[in-house]
């Protein structure tokens, strides 16, 4: 097998949550370019239809699954449907993340639980279901998109980092639990990326200056720049990488 072949995803089936836009879409597009059949999820049909069209127009294979990540039963049903239709499920990328920047004292218990359900519990539920399929196959790749804020804090933003750190713990625990069955579990921790959600911040002169000062590469990340890390962890090239957090932040988290 050549070094290029080790990055191929030919014949693999990948599920990318939040794959209709942002980093999730770029990951889905890259996986399809590498040969995988990708299933992108989200809550908005028009967004997912546009993502599937973009992937298929480029020669890739894709389909959409519309559901709310907070609906755990719906998520389990989607997993079962994919497995039944495709006969396998090789890669899961838990990419969805909701964020609510407020002081911790401003949160009710219900508001905290809503965020935790979307950002962490949904990933636990999907990962548990998919891991059992992968265990039976003897092969699989579990990937969680976390964040550098899982290790870095700022006032007024407590729940999102807590959930992302929980995802890191989940991946490390699953690495230990499922590694013997040929299933690897890893995380990607992005830094400042100029996605659609962050477009206003990325264009704000103050935030542009902040990136120049605090990111060694002196800029925001381009969404496409997440794909190398994701493709590596999903491929046979990362066959001995397990329980790792791969930081993709232009050096932001290492600069004092």
Image (spheres, rainbow, N blue to C red):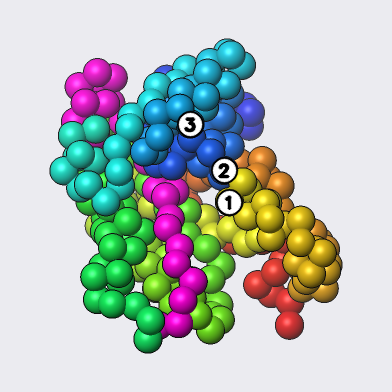
| Position of residue 17 measured from the top left corner of the image (x, y, whole percent) | 40, 41
- Neighbour class for label 2 at 10 Å: few (<14), some, many (≥20)? some
Residue 49 visible in the displayed image: yes
Choose top left, top right, bottom left or bottom right for residue 224: top right
Choose top left, top right, bottom left or bottom right for residue 138: top left
Quadrant holding the C terminus: bottom right
Choose top left, top right, bottom left or bottom right for residue 216: bottom right
In screen coordinates, is 8 left or right of 250? Answer: left
| Position of residue 92 measured from the top left corner of the image (x, y, whole percent) | 37, 41
Labels 2 & 1 near each other (Cβ < 8 A): yes
Instruction: Point out the frontmost of discs 2 and 1.
Output: 1
Q: Which residue is mark 1?
A: 197
Looking at the image, residue 253 lies above or below residue 97: below
Q: Which residue is mark 3?
A: 47
- Neighbour class for label 3 at 10 Å: few (<14), some, many (≥20)? some
Looking at the image, residue 67 lies above or below residue 104: above
Is 81 colored magenta in this rendering?
yes
Q: CA distance from mark 1 to mark 3?
A: 14 Å
Mark 1 or 3, nearer chain start = 3
Question: Residue 22 shows which numbered tag?
Answer: 2
Is 82 colored magenta in this rendering?
yes
**Which residues fall within the magenta stretch?**
79-104
Mark 3 or 2, nearer chain start = 2
């Amino acid at each position: 097998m050549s070094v290029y072949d080790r990055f191929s995803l030919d014949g693999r089936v990948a599920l990318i949550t939040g794959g209709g836009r942002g980093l999730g879409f770029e990951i889905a597009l890259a996986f399809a370019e590498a040969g995988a059949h990708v299933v992108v999820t989200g809550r908005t049909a028009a967004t997912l239809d546009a993502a599937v069209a973009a992937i298929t127009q480029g020669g890739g294979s894709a389909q959409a699954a519309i559901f709310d990540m907070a609906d755990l039963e719906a998520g389990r049903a989607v997993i079962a449907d994919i497995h039944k239709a495709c006969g396998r499920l090789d890669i899961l990328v838990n990419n969805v993340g909701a964020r609510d920047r407020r002081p911790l004292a401003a949160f009710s218990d219900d508001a905290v639980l809503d965020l935790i359900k979307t950002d962490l519990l949904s990933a636990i539920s999907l990962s548990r279901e998919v891991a059992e399929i992968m265990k039976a196959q003897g092969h699989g790749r579990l990937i969680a998109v976390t964040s550098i804020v899982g290790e870095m804090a700022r006032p007024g933003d407590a729940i999102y980092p807590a959930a992302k750190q929980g995802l890191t713990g989940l991946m490390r625990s699953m690495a230990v639990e499922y590694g013997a069955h040929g299933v690897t579990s890893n995380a990607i921790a992005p830094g400042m990326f100029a996605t659609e959600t962050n477009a206003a911040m990325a264009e704000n002169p103050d935030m542009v200056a902040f990136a120049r000062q605090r990111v060694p590469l002196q800029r925001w990340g381009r969404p496409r720049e997440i794909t190398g890390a994701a493709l590596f962890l999903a491929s046979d090239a990362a066959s001995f990488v397990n329980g790792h957090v791969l930081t993709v932040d232009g050096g932001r988290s290492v600069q004092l």
